[in-house]
Image (spheres, rainbow, N blue to C red):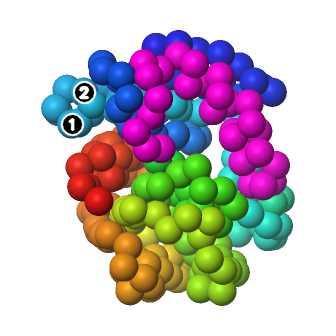
Amino acid sequence: MISFTIEQKRIDVFPGARPNTPAIYLNTYGQEGKQVFQYMRETGCPDFSLVAVSNLEWEHDMAPWDIPPIRGKDAPCTGGADGYLKLLLNQILPKAEKALPGIPSWRGIAGYSLAGLFAVYSIYQTDVFSRTASISGSLWFPGIKEYIVSHMPQKKPACMYFSLGDRECHTRNKFLKCVQQNTEALESFYRQQGIDTIFRLNPGNHFRDGVLRTAAGLQWILEQRT
């Protein structure tokens, strides 16, 4: 593992065993990247490199636009996704890939919760990522479904993974209760565009088995021969 910091963001780079393997960029709430990478190596998934970014301003860096707090004591989301994506592409990615063996055969972007929302949003702003994994993604986010159906990705992705916990929509919260409906609708929308997609419903609420769910999403996009 190689670690460095850019603008207070911590970047942990886990190089693949061979040159020119895929590279997946994983935005994390904590520092789950090491656990995800170790688990995937132990379970024999295809060789890849992982670049995990942490110490994010979560409700800012991962949010495409402003929304009010979704609960009484929560912070509002302040749309900083475009600014963070610029940092990721212009500074984090070039430095991270200097530590990788060879040139990535393709790049994916993935994340959990708001970072899963960011993974989907990012393909509308850049053509760098060809595969996405939105794990328990915050696709309840007001306006995101309308944005997606009215815009075109910078490059049609090869495949897209979506998952949720089966208890996530069981809430009275006016923001969160549509998450499964939105996620299933968007997965169907992308599939109708000829994109290789999957939606998986996992047991539990939003906070259950985050590392395992993330690893499952990354493994799926790695295994698709598109």
Decide: marks 1, 2 in contact (CB < 8 A)? yes
SS majority, magenta:
helix
Q: CA distance from mark 1 to mark 2?
A: 6 Å
Residue found at the very far left of the displayed protein: 44
Look at mark 1 in the image and give the residue it sits on: 45
Please tell me whether mark 2 sits on a helix, a strand or a loop.
Answer: helix
Q: Amino acid under label 1? A: Cys
Image x and y of residue 12, in percent = 54, 22
Image x and y of residue 7, in percent = 81, 27
Image x and y of residue 116, in percent = 53, 57
Look at mark 2 in the image and give the residue it sits on: 41
* Position of 70 relative to 48 (above/below): below
Residue depicted at x 55% and y 64% = 155
Residue 101 horizontal side relative to residue 201, left or right:
right
Residue found at the very far top of the displayed protein: 2
Residue depicted at x 44% and y 34% = 104
Q: Name the disc covering residue 222, or none.
A: none
Q: Is residue 76 visible?
A: no
The 10 Å Cα crowd at callout 2, few under 14, some 14 to 19, many 20 or more, is: some
Q: Nearer the viewer, residue 153 or 61?
A: 153
Q: Amino acid under label 2? A: Arg
Residue 70 horizontal side relative to residue 162, left or right:
right
Q: Nearer the viewer, residue 24 or 199?
A: 24
Q: Is residue 69 visible?
A: yes
Q: Quadrant of residue 196?
A: bottom left
The magenta stretch is: 80-107
* Position of 55 relative to 218 (above/below): above
Residue depicted at x 46% and y 64% = 157
Q: Quadrant of the C terminus?
A: bottom left
Q: Nearer the viewer, residue 103 or 163?
A: 103
Residue 118 horizontal side relative to residue 167, left or right:
right
* Position of 13 relative to 51 (above/below): above
